[in-house]
Amino acid sequence: MEAAAAAAAGGGCGSGPPPLLLSEGEQQCYSELFARCAGAAGGGPGPGPPEAARVAPGTVTAAAGPVADLFRASQLPAETLHQITELCGAKRVGYFGPTQFYIALKLIAAAQSGLPVRIESIKCELPLPRFMMSKNDGEIRFGNPAELHGTKVQIPYLTTEKNSFKRMDDEDKQQETQSPTMSPLASPPSSPPHYQRVPLSHGYSKLRSSAEQMHPAPYEARQPLVQPEGSSSGGPGTKPLRHQTSLIRSFSVERELQDNSSYLDEPWRITEEQREYYVNQFRSLQPDPSSFISGSVAKNFFTKSKLSIPELSYIWELSDADCDGALTLSEFCAAFHLIVARKNGYPLPEGLPPTLQPEYLQAAFPKPKWDCQLFDSYSESLPANQQPRDLNRMEKTSVKDTADLPVSTQDVTGDDKQALKSTVNEALPKDVSEDPATKSGLLPPPPALPPRPCPSQIWAIMNSVAVNICIQVVEWSEQVSEAELLPQLSRAPSQAAESSPSKKDVLYSQPPSKPIRRKFRPENQATENQEPSTVASGPASAATVKPHPTVQKQSSKQKKAIQTAIRKNKEANAVLARLNSELQQQLKEVHQERIALENQLEQLRPVTVL
Amino acid sequence: MAVCVAVIAKENYPLYIRSTPTENELKFHYMVHTSLDVVDEKISAMGKALVDQRELYLGLLYPTEDYKVYGYVTNSKVKFVMVVDSSNTALRDNEIRSMFRKLHNSYTDVMCNPFYNPGDRIQSRFVCLGRAFDNMVTSMMIPVC
């Protein structure tokens, strides 16, 4: 093999190793590595082997010291490295010329890919060799990010920070332009999450064994959030974010529901995504975000997390700061956060951490105007990504919370409709199906409870949604079978009448059959929101009023949607029925207690009179 | 300042008893138990007409050689009993009242926890309910040791 054509690259080799065919990437990589090693050699060969002295004049060589370091960094066994060194010809010629160096690198790549260390191996296409370097710079840039992912490059934290900063700054800037009113306190919490994503994608498991456990926290939980977030913020060229999002997703599959930790702070800091998730859960229990969740409701909810009662009571003690037996939004978020932490093995703190104090939470995530809040926190779950974000930014200037997630809307009315539609998404029990099965324990059960206050909310919301597309709905009335929805929707008009703005009053002057049919439209949108055409045609037809062709197209879709809706309603009914029976039992017990107490009272009364 | 603090349920079983560990705890338990009779006596002495006006603080229940026992009843007939060292003469009635008030507040906080079932022991041994309550009681008892 060595008798084959002499090496064309480099000089000074006699019967050298066979010619190397390097790809562009390899060429670049190897030349950089060589330059590094040679540059390092420029500072003095150091205690290099005497071969270095026998360098042929005029040849650039890499000093043995740095080269040896590099080879060792490839994590191959010493024997293999010896073989490689021999094969590449350095031993023979006594130094690492470019040829030898390149061949050696190629052999390393081959060895890392599992191929035998032979000259033949290097003739085929190989990935770039991977090195565990204590030096920074170079290695990161080499290879594609996907490789880095598997590389476990133990680059010092600071370096990664630098790199991540480059990417993150872009994102942050974009996101901050979208959230100009986000309070300063909120932005630091948002940057750590970005931190954590990048290091995660670089496989920093070694660096943070404990913090990692906390890591993609509700990355699981946030999968529905992450996905639209990733894609929606992908517009302004945040490719790194998208990439990381995909990496995150892959990680999140492995991990359970875990807390999000900030590298800089303790694990008790709540991130934006977590905060939103908690807020959503709060809403499911209590539609008005500024009021309380009563103790019993919260108890039932938290009991589903399957923690022991003493632990739950301790968490309650920690989080209910004012000890009033009810939870405000901040208290609820703190409690939820503690539960999540506990579920992931974190010991409960002695006292409420400062980042979980209600005042802190309120300052960090100031309560927005709840109308817009409704839009924002729910629009994130909209998978329809093609909506322009410019309008969103204008809308969002009035919104502080969750401001980094763009509101996807097409127009103002569309915004209203879709946000509310996505509210329906969240509120419906199909949350359970939405959440990936890998979310353990905590997530599937809680949505089972929320439907209790929800259905009334759902109907109210749906009716309000229906307002925006009333015209189209009227047209569909002929094709929809409404019988089943009649009893359910009989409630709706009354509730909607209470909560609806004035513009809805117009519709309710119409005969009651209209609201029923109207319900289907939002149901369709709620269940089949992947059909942007439906969405698009909605406002379009409302504007242009061309009912018939639209109706015909959507009748079949509607039927499917109706069936889905029916199924979902049945599920909801089952859950509610179960809940009802439980509550009835409790009621019976309480009644009995009361009777017993009253008896006692009666017995005691004559005694005290005396 | 207190040597022993006890919370008794309406049915006269203890929800919480804590005494300074240096002493024979059984003695305190016995004292608290016997003081319950006195408490009942005081409650019944008020009569039905005075139920609403009955003061929560019962005052000195009975003195012994070494100790004094004070009592306090809530409207739901939950009794707090406190045993104080007799040699601690600096302890005034007002202070005892304030201690009871604090006890009562902590007790209500415990009640507010939905995971607490009325009638359960106020446990604070583990990571669980009643830690704040326990801490508060500790603060009342520390100076004695």
Image: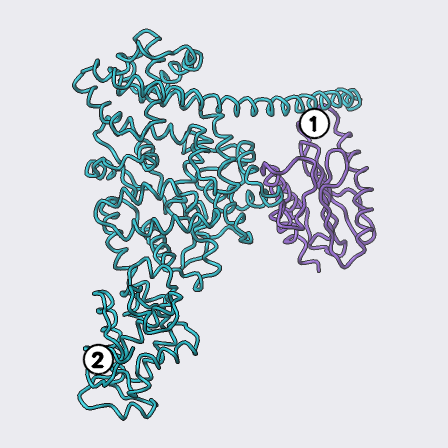
Q: Quadrant of residue A317?
A: top right
Residue B37, image x, y percentages? 81, 37
To which residue does mark 2 refer? A6
Would you identify the image quadrant in which residue A291 lies? top left
Q: Would you say A326 lies left or right of B132 here?
A: left
Mark 1 Cα-neighbour bin, 10 Å: few <14, some 14–19, many ≥20: some
Q: Position of residue A220 (x, y in %)?
A: 43, 45
In the depicted structure, whether residue A246 falls above or below residue A538: below
**How busy is the neighbourhood of tag 2: few (under 14 within 10 Å), some, or many (20 plus)?**
some
Which of the two residues, A606 or B48, is positioned nearer the viewer here?
A: A606
Q: Tell me if I can see residue A37 in this picture.
A: no
On-image quarter of the C terminus of chain A:
top right
Q: In which quadrant is the N terminus of chain A drawn?
A: bottom left
- For the point 32% across and 80% down, the residue is A67
Callout 1 amino acid: Val
Can residue A597 be seen here?
A: yes
Q: Which of the numbered marks, if any, corresponds to residue B75?
A: none
Task: Name the element at disc 2.
Answer: loop
| Colour cyan belongs to chain | A
Residue bearing mark 1: B51
